[in-house]
Amino acid sequence: MIKKKLVFSGVQPTGNLHLGNYLGAIKNFVALQKEMKCIYCVVDLHAITVFQKPHQLQENVLETVASFLATGLDPNKSILFNQSSVSGHAELAWILNCVSRIGWLNRMTQFKDKAGSEKEKASVGLYIYPNLMAADILLYKATHVPVGADQKQHLELSRDIAQKFNNDFNCKNFFPMPEPLIPKNVSRIMSLRDGTKKMSKSEDSDYSRINLKDSADEIIKKIKKAKSDSEQIPDNLKSLEKKPEALNLINIYSEITKNSLDKVLNEMSGKEYSFLKTKLSEVLINEVTPIGKEIKKLLGDKVYLGQILKKGREKANIIAEENLKNIREKVGLI
């Protein structure tokens, strides 16, 4: 029997989603809902692995939902909810904590990156959150997970945990091996101030990113101030690769216009970067500002956003509870 494809993905509610989130993940979510059943989760339990101000966390959850809806996610086609509202995530995470191995977690590079030299002060949650990520995926028996390069290692851990559970409890193929969905030809969107770093909300300068709620004037200012290069735009990618900030602007233009890098270079080569910046500002305003206006409109009706989450929770809970009933039986829990 061919198993039905099911996509699961989670986004942390950090608030104020930016162009990197949109082009790197959310735009792909919208495309996937046209092809298969999708579950999209605002992972608020993941967010609290580092301290969050409670009121701000609630606001960020609602803003993330508003951003999903504004970019085209359809709650009638996809299940959209917040993680903590379905208790099965936490329950399965504990079961999988007892299946996963410390050696596996010790190999997770993201904990080392996030904790840095302060790992003794990091929360236990930050250390074991890859097990919670595995629970998020396996709770719904998801077959496919959209991931970026920085999450691929965690998906491999989810596969290891699924395989060990199936072996430990003699239930071959009970958990499917989730496959990564890596969007083709999607470039990493880098900081407008430093082309070697990913665009991120955590960077101090707001001029490092294009936020989905930015106005046309803000977009123009940020692109104008973005680092580029004093020379003319080259006609080949090899020359451009030595100039990460300039390459980043070309990449963003390529992503928004849906043209290949070669085609963009044919259009732009020999011109000053001010020409590119003007054209880039125009296409960004057309793409981003309608989303920003819709986010702000949706945030004005928090009752509606709460209703979306409630419906999503009810749908997710039906699937979660059915699978958990079988999981408890396999483990021997009454």
Image (spheres, helix red, strand yellow):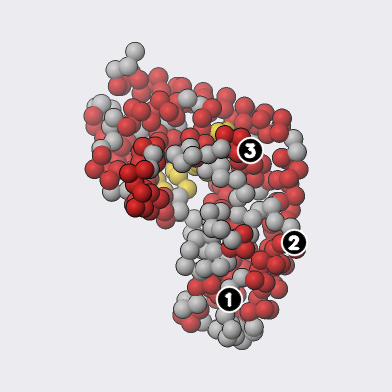
* Residue pictured at 51% horizontal, 23% vertical: 318
Front tag of 2 and 3: 3
- Quick one: quadrant of the C terminus? top left
Residue located beneath label 3 in the image: 59
Position above or below: 227 against 317: below
In front here: 110 or 330? 110
Residue 231 at x, y = what percent?
Answer: 58, 86
Q: Closer to the N terminus: mark 1 or mark 3?
A: 3
Residue beneath label 1, please?
A: 228
Q: Residue at x 47, y 48 (%)?
A: 146
Residue 171 percent across, percent down from the top left:
28, 27
**Who is closer to the viewer here, 3 or 241?**
241
Q: Around disc 1, counting alpha carbons within 10 Å, would you say few (fewer than 14), some (14 to 19), or many (20 or more)?
A: many
Q: Quadrant of the N terminus?
A: top left
Query: Which quarter of the figure has residue 323?
Result: top left
- Residue 102 position within the rendered picture, expressed as x and y whole percent measured from the top left: 25, 39
Residue on which disc 2 sits: 216
Q: Which sits earlier in the primary sequence, circle 2 or circle 3?
A: 3
- Tell me if mark 2 has few (under 14), some (14-19) or many (20+) residues whose alpha carbon lies within 10 angstroms of its own: some
Q: Secondary structure at mark 1?
A: loop
Is residue 246 at least partly visible in the picture?
yes
Q: What kind of element bears circle 3?
A: helix
The residue positioned 74% from the left and 35% from the top of the image is 301
Of the image marks 2 and 1, the number of the one nearer the N terminus: 2
Q: Residue at x 48, y 35 (%)?
A: 45
Q: CA distance from mark 1 to mark 3?
A: 35 Å
Say which amino acid is labelled 1.
Answer: Ser
Is 159 situated left or right of 257 in this image? left
Q: For residue 7, say whether it is visible.
A: no
Which residue type carries mark 3?
Glu
